[in-house]
Amino acid sequence: MLAHFTDHAANERTFLAWIRTALAVMAFGFLVERFDLFLQVAAASLGGHAISVRRQLFGDLIGLLLLVLGGVMMVVATLRYRRNRALIDSPDLQAGQHGRGDLVLVGLLLLLGGALFLYLVVHVLMSV
């Protein structure tokens, strides 16, 4: 049996949770980036009524940033998993090392979410 099995299992579960979150962020970025394709398909299913679709640079930029952020989250999760695995196996006691990277990623997600919210509010107000 692996020494410190429960610690290793918890580390792996945390790693997989970060990977799932990163994949969800990337999928949402792809959705934001390709939303105009959804509108074209919706227009075709509405009997050919044209829906005005103009390219939105801001939406495309946010979508690409979400894709990049998801990739960065995967890299950070992998580095964190490897560091914690080494700390678990180490016989020396280590003080908790809480990096600020997690807070930076959360801050970036909040900024992107706020920017998307403002974009949608402005877009809805302009279409009224």
Image (cartoon, grey):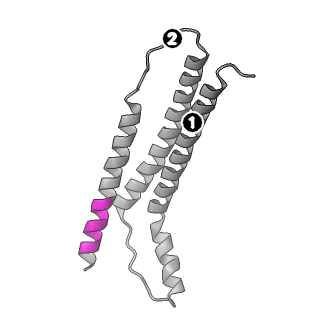
Q: Main secondary structure of the magenta part?
A: helix
Residue at 41% across, 82% down: 51
Q: Nearer the viewer, residue 22 or 65?
A: 22
Q: Residue furthest top?
A: 92
Residue position for label 1: 15
In the rendered image, the residue lying farthest to the bottom is 47
Q: Amino acid at mark 2?
A: Leu
The percent coordinates of residue 91 (x first, y second) are: 58, 9
> Where's residue 72, x and y in %?
48, 39
x and y percent of residue 87 in the render?
55, 18
User: What is the number of callouts on the image?
Assistant: 2
Q: Earlier in the sequence, mark 2 or mark 1?
A: 1
Considering the image in quadrants, where does the N terminus appear? top right
Residue contact between numbered discs 2 and 1, judged by CB atoms under 8 Å: no
- At x 60% / y 26%, what residue is drawn? 7
Q: Quadrant of residue 82?
A: top right
Q: Which mark is residue 93?
A: 2
Quadrant assignment for the C terminus:
bottom left
Q: Is residue 40 above or below residue 95?
A: below
Q: Secondary structure at mark 2?
A: loop
What is the CA distance from the residue labelled 2 to the residue labelled 1? 22 Å
